[in-house]
Image (cartoon, grey):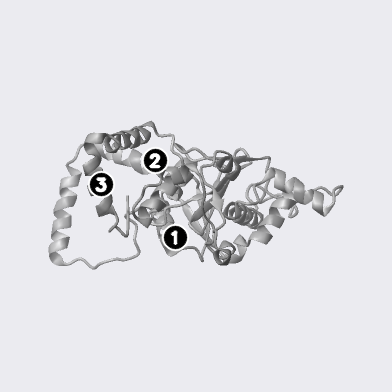
Amino acid sequence: MSARVLSVYYNRNRLGAACYDQETTTIFVLTDLLEDEDDFRMAHSLLLQLEPSIVIVSKMQDVNLLTKLNKLCFGEKNSTATKIPDKQTEQNSAINEEEMDEKDEEDVDENEEQTEERPLIALHLMPSVAYNFEDAKKRISSLFESLNLTEEENHLRLAFRVDLTATNMISAFGALLKYLDAVRLGVEFEDINTKTPISTIKTITLEEMLQMDDSSMRALQIFQDDLHPSACKAYSVGGAREGISLFRMCNRCQSKSGEALLRRWFERPTTNRETLTNRVTAIHYFVQDCNLDSADFIRIRLKKICILKV
């Protein structure tokens, strides 16, 4: 049975990943994308789409991400905590077992099929050093470098093949290569100098999501950073402000949480027709003249919202 190893790295609210498929000897990379720090939807969608057999992650990652991956890999019901049942609980469990035995065999077969559809995924915690950006870039560069080229030419060759601005993806890619070299996946019985074969590298996008790079964002003027008019704030941390852009034209949010949610929608465009239809229907309702009073009433109340979870 061929293995599929997935490496993920989360930093600064962005998720990057790289996955190795042993059957096709292909590495799939996921460019950094904005992640929901509350429920990690992108990580959940990534595991459902790739269906890996092994997941590797840094042990120094966010606790919420490690908890989410633990649930996705081992299931929601698995837990280390155990309780000692009392006599009444034992009697109730015995009655429930008798009732379960009387159920039809078809229900049992359906449950077995459901458990077979979602096998357990092995979760490996890697040291944080394995996700060092510079070390990861060197490991990736060794895949493309040529002895006939200079160091600068090899760096340019790497920049054409891999997006070096996606730092989380590069870190996850480097950790994946280090893991493959350690376990020698697929070449366990070959010569010690033989490495895991890698034939191609492909970029993937999550289902129902449109992937756009920074160049396309700037060309379409979806976001535009301008320097602050004040000389004191222009070159300070957070000194840039939103310029004339599509996001600024559409941003009528009254709270910081609402503005952050709208920014996520712009950074992660969806291709789900139902979601797009619902958004258009909501916009059509609030721009009608007969609903302006309702829109103003809701807009005033939204100013008091501090946390927005959907």
Q: Position of residue 133 (x, y in %)?
A: 64, 60
Q: Does dot 2 land on a helix, a strand or a loop?
A: helix
Q: Are marks 1 and 3 in contact (CB under 8 Å)?
A: no
Residue under the image location 51 percent in, 65 percent down = 59
**Residue 123 placement, left or right of 115:** right
Q: Residue at x 13, y 59 (%)?
A: 91
Q: How far, Cα to Cα, is label 1 from label 3?
A: 42 Å
- Identify the residue under disc 3: 296
Res. 144 visible in picture: no
Q: Nearer the viewer, mark 1 or mark 2?
A: 1
> What x and y, as percent, mark residue 20?
59, 46
Mark positioned earlier in the residue sequence (1 or 2): 1
As shown in the figure, which amino acid type bears the numbered disc 2? Glu
**Residue denoted by label 2:** 117
Q: Are marks 1 and 2 in contact (CB under 8 Å)?
A: no
Q: Residue at x 74, y 52 (%)?
A: 142
Could you say where residue 51 lies in the image, as x and y percent from the top left?
Answer: 47, 43
Q: Judge the density around disc 2: few (<14), some (14-19), many (≥20) Cα neighbours within 10 Å.
A: few
Name the residue nearer the viewer: 102 or 261.
261
